[in-house]
Amino acid sequence: MKKNRLGSSDLLVSEIGLGCMSLGTDENQAVSLIHEALDRGVNFLDTADIYDDGRNEEIVGSALKGRRQDIILATKAGNVRVPGQSGLTWDPSKQHILSAVKESLRRLKTDYIDLYQLHGGTLEDNMGETIEAFEQLKREGVIRYYGISSIRPNVIREYVQRAQIVSVMSQYSLLDRRGEEEVYPLLDEHGISVIARGPVASGALADGRDDKAAKGFLDYSGAQITDIRHQLRPLVSEQRSMSQTAIRYALHHPAVATVIPGASSRTQLLENIGAAEAPSLTEAEYELLREMTKANLYTQHR
């Protein structure tokens, strides 16, 4: 498995990571999937404190036993689930971050986090206070590096200018190219890596998932996605499936260090990891893929 440096850090992450949100709450099955991913060269695991109300971190923590030194572990904080209330509240305060990290460490059964990420962000936040919290945790050795998870260009620009972030996690696929032209070049210029989530667009670009395609994705109708899938077929072969082609698209951008597709089954996991051995896109193939979504390009920053 090829490894790439994450931003300016000394973290070398596998180009295919594992987004742990989709693993489910069956601990035996989830731990088995994580171990299989690790055995096949994946070393980057991403979770968050709110996934399954913290249960996801606990399961990842169980999977880490005896293998912590081989894993680049990432989690996130900033969202709060208030008991008795629906939805989430946003709290990027220093007090919350310093408190949340302790709970994440407990659930993950570790004494440090390789990459701690702000799970969102707005221009109304007290960014100075947020950055201060991350810098303090870094000085104390609780975290090694920090980044943000955001699709908001203005927020990303502020953190690029004001903080020592090494990464930005962003939804990125052939059907969601927000940031590709506007933000990713800025990150590349500053030596900050993109962690690409959702490379197969919630299954809309996955093999055999005509049902997902029919439901549409973002501003794309089901008919438009079905047409794009039809156009993708000439690029699909025995060496590279449709979902692997989609993953290779995300990896083609120079700012992207790793993609983190999720998996809820062994079949999905192996399909995703197989993209590491699939042929990279040629420049001609890459431009062809860009062209086929150009007419309905989704670039809105919401």
Image (spheres, rainbow, N blue to C red):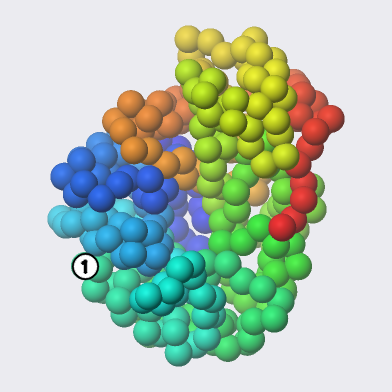
Q: Say if 58 sits above or below 259 in the image.
A: below
**Relative to 239, 163 lies left or right:** right
Count of numbered circles in the view: 1
Q: Observer-nearest residue: 297 or 286? A: 297
User: Which residue occupies 54% across, 80% down?
Assistant: 92
Badge 1: residue crowd in 10 Å (few <14, some 14–19, many ≥20):
some
Q: Is residue 28 left or right of residue 47?
A: left
Q: In what quadrant of the picture does the C terminus appear?
A: bottom right
Horizontal and vertical percent position of residue 195: 55, 51
Question: Which residue is found at the position 58% from the left and 88% from the top?
Answer: 129
Q: Nearer the viewer, residue 261 or 164?
A: 261
Q: On screen, 253 above or below 285?
A: below
Q: In this orientation, does residue 239 appear? A: yes
Q: Is residue 135 visible?
A: no
As shown in the figure, which amino acid type bears the numbered disc 1? Lys
Image-based side of 147 in relation to 277, left or right: right
Q: Residue at x 31, y 65 (%)?
A: 54
Look at the numbered disc 1 and give the secondary structure of its residue: loop
The location of residue 9, given as percent across then percent down, is: 51, 63
Quarter of the image that includes the N terminus: top left
In the displayed structure image, the side of residue 23 where residue 183 appears, left or right: right
The residue located at (65%, 49%) in the rendering is 255
Q: Which residue is mark 1?
A: 109
Q: Position of residue 246 (x, y in %)?
A: 58, 29
Residue 289, percent across and down?
72, 25
